[in-house]
């Protein structure tokens, strides 16, 4: 069959006192059944806004959303709040960076997992409790029969993250959106959580959108990668394509600031100079041009004048005025000097 989630020309604009913020400005992608799409970009690139718009969790008083987001044929962008409530926690689910903000301090972990289950299945309290114990075991909480009656503050940070994953997966969602779920955790716990997500995905076949500012986090889990900059997709492809033969100078910069085996951590990494653009008054032309080292190679002021089109063939493409030959040549130079 076709893609499970198909997003076309998504636009999310906020009205503020200072004007319209074009947080997402024409984003398209597909997600297949059981696949993981990594969405990567700096903060303010529109990643989280995309996620909130898909889930219907944006503030509708000041937000305008255009485009199409078909989940199994149903358009999430035109769904009613009631329909979205039925979908959330059930067919689609989410986990965030901050488990404490997602879990209520006033109820036991088991009750919170169980209530999500009851809401969507109509199960009894007893069945919901059993299911909560089962889920806690599944996410690797030791002694789940005892810990099910703990409150969130009695869990460590890593355990709370596991509990949030248990709550997100309790109804076997077909889509899981994970927004920086490991960012607040230390490296060891982060690796354990990523392993857990991979195992659970293998078991359940859930499709995952994994949102992160750190390309390194998704090198294991992602099948496909979408790089966002300034509210737009600047590059997409399979993980192998984007990591091994990236075509966009912004992606080169992200790779350059990522520790890797052939880039020991005692060598200073090179973050991309400059700051992400304001989406109130975005740069003209290519939104990356104020930070790009390659505008002279394009020449004629084109980078500042004209928005480079994103040409996608078989899911692979980048939005840059450099020619295909230049992209290969300059990336080789760039990688050589790292
Ligand atoms: Fe750099 Fe120009 Fe390509 Fe934008 S279009 S990434 S400014 S070379
Ligand atoms: Mg974010």
Image (tube, rainbow, N blue to C red):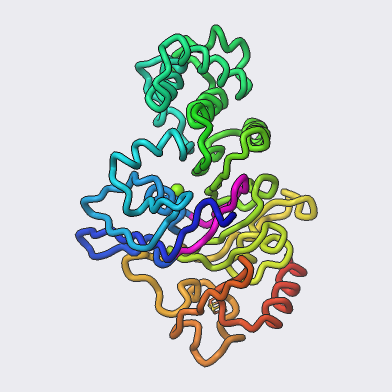
In the displayed orientation, state which residue is furthest to the bottom.
Answer: 300
On the question of residue 221 being in view, the answer is yes
**Residue 41 forms part of the magenta stretch:** yes
Q: Vertically, is 143 above or below 241?
A: above
Q: Quadrant of residue 15?
A: bottom left
**Which residue range is magenta in the image?**
27-42
Identify which residue is drawn at 68% across, 82% down.
326
In the displayed orientation, state which residue is furthest to the front.
Answer: 1
In the displayed orientation, state which residue is furthest to the right.
Answer: 262
Q: Vertically, is 153 above or below 286?
A: above
Q: Quadrant of residue 238?
A: bottom right
Which secondary structure class fits the magenta region best?
strand
In this rendering, the count of numbered labels is: 0
Identify which residue is drawn at 79% across, 54% down.
262
Q: Quadrant of residue 104?
A: top left
Across and down, in percent, residue 129 comes to 47, 12
The N terminus lies in quadrant? bottom right
On the question of residue 178 being in view, the answer is no
Across and down, in percent, residue 271 comes to 59, 59
Is residue 216 or residue 132 the one in the foreground? 132
The C terminus lies in quadrant? bottom right
172 sits to left or right of 63: right
Across and down, in percent, residue 311 comes to 56, 75
**Residue 158 forms part of the magenta stretch:** no
Identify which residue is drawn at 50% across, 53% down.
5
Q: Vertically, is 281 above or below 75?
A: below
Across and down, in percent, residue 89 comes to 43, 33
Is residue 282 or residue 151 the one in the foreground? 151
Is residue 37 or residue 188 the one in the foreground? 37
């Amino acid at each position: 069959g076709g893609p499970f989630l198909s997003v076309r020309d998504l636009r999310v604009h906020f009205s503020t006192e200072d004007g319209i913020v074009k947080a997402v400005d024409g984003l398209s992608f597909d997600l297949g059944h059981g696949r993981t799409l990594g969405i990567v970009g700096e903060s303010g690139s529109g990643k989280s806004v995309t996620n909130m718009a898909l889930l219907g969790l944006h503030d509708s008083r000041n937000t305008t959303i255009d485009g199409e987001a078909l989940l199994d044929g149903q358009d999430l962008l035109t769904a009613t709040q009631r329909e979205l409530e039925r979908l959330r926690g059930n067919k689609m689910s989410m986990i965030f960076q901050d488990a404490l903000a997602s879990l209520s301090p006033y109820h036991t972990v088991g009750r919170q997992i169980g209530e999500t289950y009851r809401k969507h299945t109509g199960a009894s309290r007893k069945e919901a409790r059993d299911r909560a114990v089962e889920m806690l075991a599944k996410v690797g909480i030791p002694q789940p029969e005892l810990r099910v009656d703990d409150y969130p503050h009695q869990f460590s940070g890593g355990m709370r993250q596991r509990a949030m994953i248990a709550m997100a997966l309790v109804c076997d969602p077909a889509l899981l959106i994970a927004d920086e779920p490991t960012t607040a955790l230390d490296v060891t716990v982060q690796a354990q959580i990523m392993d857990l997500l991979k195992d659970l995905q293998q078991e359940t076949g859930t499709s995952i959108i994994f949102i992160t500012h750190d390309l390194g986090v998704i090198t294991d889990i992602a099948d496909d990668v979408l790089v966002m900059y300034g509210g737009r997709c600047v590059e997409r492809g399979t993980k192998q394509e984007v990591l091994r033969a990236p075509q966009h100078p912004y992606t080169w910069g992200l790779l350059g600031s990522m520790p890797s085996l052939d880039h020991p951590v005692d060598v200073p990494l090179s973050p991309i100079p400059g700051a992400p653009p304001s989406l109130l008054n975005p740069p003209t032309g290519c939104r990356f041009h104020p930070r790009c080292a390659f505008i002279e190679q394009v020449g004629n002021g084109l980078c500042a004048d004209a928005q480079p089109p994103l040409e996608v063939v078989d899911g692979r493409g980048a939005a840059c005025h450099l020619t295909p030959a230049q992209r290969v040549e300059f990336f080789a130079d760039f990688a050589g000097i790292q």
